[in-house]
Amino acid sequence: MAATTSSAGKPATISGVEIVLESVTKRYPNQKQPAVDNVNLTIPAGEIVVFVGPSGCGKTTTMRMINRLIEPSSGTITIGGKDALSIDPNELRRGIGYSIQQAGLFPHLTIAKNVATVPGLIGWDKQKIKARTDEMLDLVGLDPDMYRDRYPRQLSGGQQQRVGVARALAADPPVLLMDEPFGAVDPITRGLLQDELMRLQSELGKTIVFVTHDFNEAVKLGDRIAVLGNQSAIMQYDTPEAILANPANDMVAGFVGADASLKQLTLTRVRDVDLIQCPTVTEGDSVDELRTLLAGRKRQWALILDDRGRPMRWVNPSHLAHASSLRGTGMPVGEVVSVQSTLQDALEALLAESTASTVATGSRGEYVGLITIDTLVSHLSSMREEHAHDHEEGDHKAVDAESNEVAR
């Protein structure tokens, strides 16, 4: 993030540090070929860098060598300018957050004790640990009073994953390693967790190394993506925009796929486009006044909001025909997207809605606007025009350079 253009938005502060891998190799006994061969990579401070590649290519092995859960056979790894191989492994790991698939929580410990694991190991006092635990639960969207004394089995998969992230961040590490952390949850929950991670990163500015086999997830989350081949050979290391526009080779193009233009929707957040507005009411408002308001509109839908401005139900003239009150009137709002969501998320939510639009909400779940198919089509058209203009400018510069060369 820092001075770069981030998929998740620039953080208010950067608390992460740079990670540098130089000639990092991992060989296992009785194997002819190394599992990871001569990786050279710089991960900038405060950015999300995503490792993506086929199963067995070495991406998880490469990531685990950063905190020495797997020891490198050769090469050097520096974290914030310090040689990771010169630090005691246990001390090193306590300074690096680690989040894995299915959260990896201790089933016999309460949620509070799970989150407090690393602060306890490094000697924080009880009051500081309690305050930090509550702060972390609140940060990941879990009410401390409701969840601190529960056990992992009493939480949903998505809630457990949030606790896993809270635990990884509890000791305020500069680096967070995430090994397919959202791979075991359903697609809707996965999208919400991705949005939550981007919101957290916008506040915290950690250095995050994220492993996934899902290229769409890589595009959504990554400031940079490292597309890895066999033995973690780096096929391309660049921003999502650059990789989508110019895949380095056939393998990378295979990851990008034929729907590259639709993947462009993953590069834009809901907060970055102009949202459409519709009439909003509360349950205490007048049915007659709403009926009159909708009668003069081309798009005859309104939203009923609760007392905190959160969307509850859609309502149209057919719902109002025999209604005497807005209480219980209309149909429930389906899947919503947040301002952190991508336009790709909005498209998926939109296709499931009978209203031909999806509701966008703010950080507290409050209604902020609507996204429609027209919103998405307009955005893709403007992106195509922008790319065509950039391509035309590039051609002109090439011609000018050739002309100057001839003149010399």
Image (cartoon, helix red, strand yellow):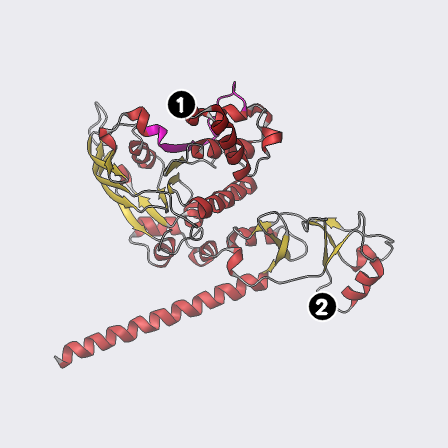
Observer-nearest residue: 280 or 226?
280
Verify whether residue 195 appears in magenta: no
Mark 2 falls on what kind of element? loop
> For mark 1, what is the residue?
121
Q: Position of residue 135 (x, y in %)?
A: 52, 35
- The mark closer to the camera, 1 or 2, is 1
Characterize the local packing of mark 1: few (<14), some (14-19) or many (20 or more) Cα atoms within 10 angstroms. few
Q: Which residue shows up at 83% across the image and 58% down it? A: 286
Magenta highlight range: 93-110
Residue sitting nearer the eye, 119 or 147: 119
* Image-quadrant location for residue 117: top left
x then y, percent, for residue 82: 24, 36
- Work out whether mark 1 precedes mark 2 in sequence or the reverse, and give the earlier one: 1
The residue tagged 2 is 298
Q: Are marks 1 and 2 in contact (CB under 8 Å)?
A: no
* Left or right relative to 63: residue 338: right
Q: Is residue 124 above or below residue 8?
A: above
Q: Quadrant of residue 406?
A: bottom left
Please tell me which residue is depicted at 41% across the width and 48% down the height of the picture: 13
Packing grade of label 2 (10 A; few <14, some 14-19, many >=20) is few
Amino acid type at mark 2: Lys
